[in-house]
Structure formats: C-alpha cells, structure tokens
Image (tube, grey):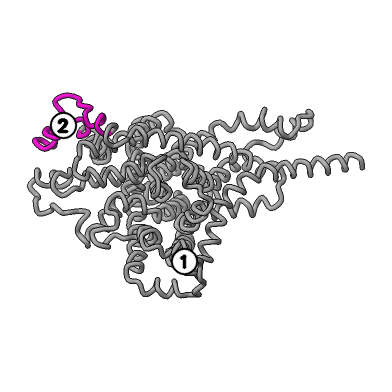
Amino acid sequence: MSIKRWGSAALIRLMLILMAFVTIYPVLFTLITSFKTSDEFYSNLWALPSQINIENYIEAFKVGKFGDYLLNSVVLAATSLVSVTIIATFAAYALARLRVPFAGSIIGFLFVMQILPVESMIIPLYMMMSKLNLFDITYLPIGLAYLGWLLPGTIVILRNFFMSIPVELLESARIDGSGELSTMFRIVFPLAGGAVATCTVFNFAFVWGELMWARIATLTTEKGIPLSVGLINFQGQYTTNWGLMTAAICMVLIPLIVLFIFLQKYFVQGLTSGAVKG
Amino acid sequence: MKHGFTAQSLHSKTRMLGILFLVPAALFISFSSLIPIVWNFILSFAEWNGFSSMKMVGLDNYVTLFQDSVTMKGFRYSVFIAVVSSVIAMISGLFLALLVYRLGNREGTVFRLIFFTPSMMPFIVIGLLFTFILSPDMGLLNQFFRIIGLESLERAWLAEPGLVLWTIAVVSGWRGSGSVMMLLYTAIVTIPSSMFEAARLEGMNYSQQIRRIILPLIMPMIGLVSMLVLIGAFKTYDIVYSMTKGGPGDYSKIVPIQMLDVGFTFNEFGYAAAIGVIFTVLVSIIIFISRKVVRGDVYEY
C-alpha cells in the first residue's frame, strides 16, 4: 500500500517536472541564445555561451531603435492605465452604490461590450480618428482606443468589489454626517487597493502586448511606435538574425516576467475575478 | 414627513453624483466602441474607398463576401484555430490542475507558477518565440528530432499548408492551458477536505476520487472556463500575424488578417466592415451555442 502510494506520487512528480521543463525550456533557450554570438549559435545550438555577451542587446538598441519603442510602450501603458483606473473607479462606485437608474442594464451592456470582438470596431474607429486628424498626435490614437476597450471589463470587476463592501459601513458613515464624496475617498477607495492592482496588472498585460490596433494606428507615422509593433518590424528586417531577434524578444519579456513574479497574487486574482463576473 | 423629504433629496443628490461619475466612462466607451460598432454596421452596406464620398450599395458587400473564397476560408481557419486551441487548453489545463493538486499546496506552488507563465506572455511574444523554436533549420524542435534520431519527424512547421493551422492551434492552446490550470485548481481547492477524507476511508484511490468527486463538483467551473477560453480563442490576430502573417500563401489567413488586408491594402472599407459584421455574428453564435452546451448540473455541497 505505502509503496504503491509512493509510486504514484513519484510518478506525478516526474510527469510534472517533465512538463515544467517543456514549458520553461523554450523561454530559457531563447534567453541563452540572446547572450551568444552568431558564431557560437551556429557552431553549437545547445551549448551555453562562453561568456555573457550583451552585443545583441546593444545592437538591438542601436539599429532596432528599441530604446524608443520601450519608452513609447512605457508612456502608453502608464497614461492609459492611470486614466482607466481613475475613470473606472468612479464609474464602478456609481454603479455599485450611488443608486444610478438602470444600473443592472448598464452592467449587462458593459459585459456585451467586453465580449464583442475588436474586429467589429477597428475599421470605423480608424476612419473617425483619421477624419479628426488624431493620427498626427503621438500616443493619443492608441491610448484612446485602449481606454475605451479596457473600461468595460475594469468597471465590471471593480463594481463587483464595491458591492462586496458591507452597506452598513457606508450607512454608518452617512449617519455620522460624512458626505458622499468624503465617504468615497476616506472609506471606500482605501479598501479598493487590491482590486485596483488586480485590474491594473491585467490591463498592463494587454497594453504591453497588443498588436492589431497599435499596428494600424502607426501605419502612417514613425513616431510613438510601441514595442509590439517594433518587434514585428524588427522581425521583417532581421528574419534569421536569431541573436538579435532573441534579444528583442527577451527585452519585451523580461519586464513582464519580473512583474509577474512580484505580482503573481494579482494575476491570479484577476483571472478568478474575470471568471466569476456576469 | 420632513424626514421623508430630506431622504428624498439626499437620494436624488446621490443619484446625480452617480450619473456624473458615469459620464467620462460613457464618453470614452462610446467613442472607441459603441459609435464604431454602429458605424461598422452602416458601413457594411456601403461602398467606400476612404477618400471619395460613400455610396450605399445594399447587400452587395455581403454577396461579395459569400462568394470570396479567401474570406470564406478565413472563417473556417478562425473557427478551426479557436475550437482546436480551446480543446487543447481545456484538456491540458485540467490535466495539469489535477496533477498539481495531488502534490499539495507547498510543492504545487512552484509548478503553478511555471505552468501559468505562458498565459501571461503576450501573444506576439509567444508567436515570435515559436517562429524561432519551430524554424526549419536551426529551430529547437527540429534539432531535437535530429538528436534523438527521428529525422523523419522534421517539418517546416509554419510553412506546410496542412500543418500550419494545427501548429498555431497547439501553440495557442499551450498558452491558454496555464489560465485553465489556475482557474480549475482554485475550484478544486474549494472542495471541502472532508469529502476526500471520506473517500480515502472508503479506499478510493486518486483516479477514483477524480472521477467520483472532483470532476462532478468542478463541472460548473469547467463550463464557465471553457466559455472564457473560447471567447479568448477568437482573438487570433496577434499570434497568427507574428507567426505566419497569414501564409504560406493564404493557408492561415484568418478573418482579422483578411479584413485588414481588404481594408488597408485594397481600400475596400465597406467590404471590410461587412467581414467584421459577419465575424461578430459568428463569434456570438458560437459563444451562445457553447453556453447552452456546457451548462451542467450544479451540486450543492
């Protein structure tokens, strides 16, 4: 009996280790390749580099304009995430606790908005922005679209969180003579930190990697190109220069992995709060 | 009486404040989602090259769409990738969740972290990563086959017409499996441990526990997760564009790529809008059907 149980646990462990290896190895391999010179890569694919060689990264920064792309992505992420968070918090609180008429239907509408594929909106969105000459303004066309697309989901998740705050807490504040605004800022928002972090982490992952709209919105300009589009352009130019390509991939991936390791909790919460909504 | 009056005015004040708070969100959502969707619908009945004035042409765009073999194949490819990658993500995610749960919380944490990693990587990064891993000559996979002496298995994974869709679906399913694992794991953890103790007393082994306890109890969650996965699985533009750009030829030209080509390469914006409309209808129908299918029994415990 005990031998059998040990046997099956060991088998499970072995399978998991094998699968973990299969999952992690492509990423590790890419990371290792990015530190190799082209000679090292072609002479032995599997070997570790003789020394940590950051030539590829330097070259990606120099010829690939990766510094610019990185900066653009950071600016885009920061501005759109801050605006999404502020606007969504107010809207979510209004829908949860401020007796807005038709709150239920509004939530339903937001839910539909979130499910509808982006394909049903980008052609006219491009035309609207082009008519309004928004494409001349750096960052704005991309940020504006992200803002509108991220708001519905964020509002729904934050609203669910605000609903979970006991009404008694708000009532007692009201009885103590606290105005609606001061209740919000002094009691409700300080409690919302975790929920906001969850949404922000999730939204960041979207903004950092989105390609379709970012590519269309920068078709006619050289300015404000984010990392995702930069990577694709890069791929077009250096198809088989794997050292350079892998360095570029790692530059997008490493910030995300670092963030993920520190904010794991919020990634998982975002996943589950996304699953129970609606 | 007086009290009632002040409560009334307080309510209406609260309500006004609430509406005020909704205004910015309403403006931005209208601008980048709602108005474009309505416009897209109107545009799908028009002919427009983006410069001259618009001409209403009735159902012409839709007639073109159903006669255009590239577009029609695009729909088939999109549905194929969505369905196959969802199935792969669900099965492997469930499998991983069951294995990780067996190991217990402490040891499982590391594995959960590792298996979840692909799910938080952007599609474009996954796509480029796999163009490298799957490249015919220097790619990891083909090199691996060469080392273990199975040269016959070497393929041009992203350049063979019959193979490319499968490759994309597997990679995309691999990415999805991490989220599925995490969600199903959290569902399994909420099952009361008393049930497992009872099962152990009756001498059930783990595979019996899976069949008799875990699977029936997490069925509703499995249904919900498959819906979420399926919705996500139609967002294929980023991964397909970064892996194949629709090639070889048109063999992986999914709907979004075809739509943007029609719009921005050939300037037929009306036709592109019609493709967008049909795509939206198709996705909605599939989500609706799957919702009916996966609605399982809910056990109280």
Is A52 part of what is drawn in magenta? yes
Left or right: where B77 falls relative to B12: left
Mark 2, other Cα within 10 Å: few <14 / some 14–19 / many ≥20: many
Instruction: Provide the chain ID for the residue under circle 2.
Output: A
Left or right: where A114 falls relative to A52: right
Q: Residue at x 70, y 47 (%)?
A: A100
Regarding residue A28, the answer to whether it shows in the image is: yes
Q: Which residues are magenta?
A: A33-60
Q: Residue at x 58, y 47 (%)?
A: B28
Disc number placed over residue B84 in the picture, else none? none
Q: Secondary structure at mark 1?
A: loop
Q: Position of residue A180 (x, y in %)?
A: 73, 34
Q: Position of residue B205 (x, y in %)?
A: 33, 44
Residue marked by disc 1? B48
Instruction: Provide the chain ID for the residue under circle 1.
Output: B
Q: Quadrant of residue B10?
A: top right
Q: Position of residue A15 (x, y in %)?
A: 25, 41
Residue marked by disc 2? A37
Relative to the observer, which residue lies in front, A119 or B120? Answer: A119
Residue type (three-letter) at the residue carrying disc 1: Trp
Q: Position of residue B164 (x, y in %)?
A: 24, 57
